[in-house]
Image (cartoon, rainbow, N blue to C red):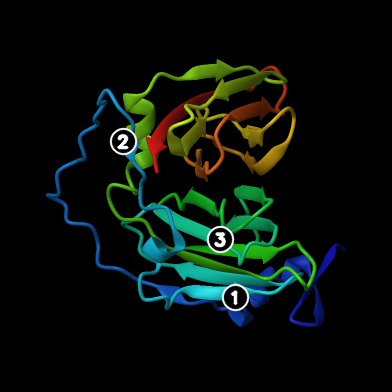
Amino acid sequence: SLACEVEGAMVSMPDRASICERLQGPMVGAPPASPGAPAPQAEMPAGLQPASAWGIGEVSPDASLVQRVEGKSRKTWRFSDLSRERVQVAVSSAGRPVHADIQLWLGPDWTPYTLRAYSEDGKRRPVQTLVGTRCKAAMVEVRNLGESEFPFAAAANYAKDPMASLPIELPASTPGERVDGGALRSFALDPAAGQVEVVLLTDGRQLNARVELLVGPNNPKQSYEVFTNNGELNSLCVAFDTPDAGATVRVVNHAPVEFPCYIHVRERRA
């Protein structure tokens, strides 16, 4: 059977429940959201909005949930609050490349969401994403696919408003564009933009796509490649920091033609 190496021991995939027990990451708990809290109102000013709270410092202000992930190793975070459905994940480095694999585990052997992230410079362009837990007890795994010379820091925590509602608010407040299976779309960014938020979703069908940040002709500086069995419950929601002018966001739908997806893009100033 397919095997993977965890903490120096070879274990088979059916033993994944024991992996979860031995790799208990920080237990993330937060008081349930107030039922009477008002929903955030979408705003569409004429200029660019300020950058959102995507950074690793906003995910874990006291750094208690920040873990160092060495090359070829993994770290996990547990989430048990069934009243909350959105986890914020951030990965950064000291300026070296980042090759990370982010997975959502529901139960001992179900991985409904996988995100592979790459950044040429984890300091200037950190990995920043939101992952839906489907209101279930979940575990988020961050694996470093790079070599031992390229460690990075990662943190995961329940998202708070307005970040928690961003995957719903952004599509409701911005025009979307349909990307059919096998198709490609590109969006040139405003030179004044310091950050761009991207939401990629479906009508409940599978989502299998790649989103890239290009600087120059066919020169990807950062990319996210996602697969999920339900692009409505687990839409792709990421943020690109854009320190360089002349950047472009490119979206490629890897799914067959029967599985279109919809992309929403919002630029923000630095």
Using the image, tell me which numbered label, if any, was put on residue 49. Answer: 2
Q: Residue drawn 25% across and 62% down?
A: 32
Element assignment for label 2: strand
- Badge 1 vs badge 3, beta-carbon distance below 8 Å: no
Using the image, tell me which numbered label, if any, was put on residue 68. Answer: 1
Residue 219 in the figure: left or right of residue 191: right
Place of residue 140 in the rendered image (x, y in percent of width and height, measured from the top left): 55, 62
Using the image, tell me which numbered label, if any, was put on residue 91. Answer: 3
Quadrant in which residue 62 is drawn: bottom left
Q: Nearer the viewer, residue 204 or 183?
A: 183
Q: Residue drawn 59% across and 28% down?
A: 248
Element assignment for label 1: strand
Place of residue 25 in the rendered image (x, y in percent of width and height, measured from the top left): 53, 76
Place of residue 239 in the rendered image (x, y in percent of width and height, measured from the top left): 49, 43
Marks 1/3: CA distance? 10 Å
Could you tell me the amino acid type at mark 3?
Answer: Val
Q: Residues within 10 Å of mark 2 (few under 14, many from 20)?
A: some
The disc, 1 or 2, on the residue closer to the chain's N-terminal end is 2
- Badge 2 vs badge 3, beta-carbon distance below 8 Å: no
Q: Nearer the viewer, residue 38 or 16?
A: 38
